[in-house]
Structures are given as structure tokens and as C-alpha cells.
Image (cartoon, grey):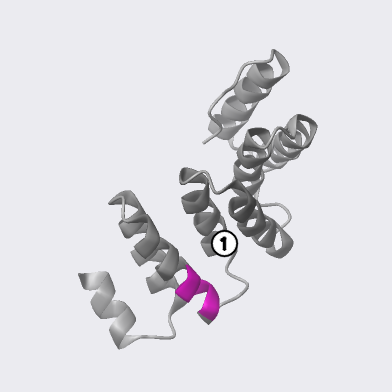
Amino acid sequence: ENLRKLVKKYPDYSFGYYQLGNVLFRQGKKEDAIKEYEKAIQKNSKYALAHNALGSVFASQQRWDEAITAYQKALAINPDYGDALTNIAQALWEQGKRNEAIASLEKALNIFKSQDRPEKIRQIEQILKELKAGDDPSVS
């Protein structure tokens, strides 16, 4: 409710729409979340977090092509966005693009190492191990 007041008071504030999208997504209101993320992007087309979040909603609906497009937009804005690389890997894997998924995860791993993010490093190393063993891990 407070976020709705915020975006009403500051309609050009993309962060408010992004946060509202996050709340709606957590509440399972996926179509409403999509609308809010799209508003955030409309206000700021270079908002990589909003593109990534939009991709995550699409992925949760198994709308892989749309998810990949959203993640690609996030990565065009910030090529070192490790979370977007991780997310796009899941979507690529779901489409049977195994080698592309692994390459994306390996790039994410290098980024997380350069950012000294041990939890993400362990997560990606485990996912890569499972992928290379032929398992079907959940990336997100």
C-alpha cells in the first residue's frame, strides 16, 4: 500500500515500480508484477535490475523466450551482472541449450569470483557440477 502511494506521489520514480513489482511477485501476482516491472523499465530503460526481475517472472511461468529476452536486455546494460547470467543459464537449459547454459554459468562464476561473493561461487560451482554430470538442477 505504501509503495502504491509512493509511485502515485512520484510517478517518474522507476525504483518504486520495481519494488512494487517485487512485492507483487512474492505475493504470486505475476501479471501485476510484470506490469510494474514494465513501468519501471518505461521510466528507465537502462534499469538492469528491472529487466532481470521481469525475466524471473517470465521464467516462473515457463515463458522461456520472453525470459531470455529480458535477461539479455539486463546483460546488454550490465555485462557483468552475474545474477542475470545465472538466470539466463536456467532459461537456456530449459530450452535444451546445454552448452550455452554452461558457458553463461562459467562467466557468472568468474564474475562472482572477481566480486568475492563466496556464497554465489559455491552455488554456481555446485550447479555446474550437476549440469556436467547430466543432472537437471534448479538454477534459481
- Residue at the image position 38 percent from the left and 85 percent from the top: 11
Count of picture labels: 1
Q: Position of residue 24 (x, y in %)?
A: 32, 58
Q: Which residue is mark 1?
A: 51
Instruction: Establish if 108 lies above or below 81.
Output: above
Residue at the left extreme of this rendering: 1
Disc 1 residue type (three-letter): His
Q: Is residue 123 left or right of residue 105?
A: left
The span shown in magenta is 38-42
Q: Please tell me which residue lies in front, 63 or 27.
A: 63
Q: Quadrant of residue 74?
A: bottom right
**Residue 39 colored magenta?**
yes
Q: Position of residue 27 (x, y in %)?
A: 27, 51
- Residue at the image position 73 percent from the left and 55 percent from the top: 79
**Residue 120 colored magenta?**
no
Q: Position of residue 139 (x, y in %)?
A: 56, 32
Instruction: Establish if 11 lies above or below 60.
Output: below
Q: Is residue 99 left or right of residue 54?
A: right
- Residue at the image position 60 percent from the left and 63 percent from the top: 48
Q: Please tell me which residue lies in front, 36 or 95.
A: 95
Q: Main secondary structure of the magenta part?
A: helix
Q: Quadrant of the N terminus?
A: bottom left
Q: Quadrant of residue 92?
A: top right
Instruction: Establish if 56 lies above or below 126.
Output: below
Q: Secondary structure at mark 1?
A: helix
Q: Residues within 10 Å of mark 1 (few under 14, many from 20)?
A: many
Q: Is residue 12 left or right of residue 126?
A: left
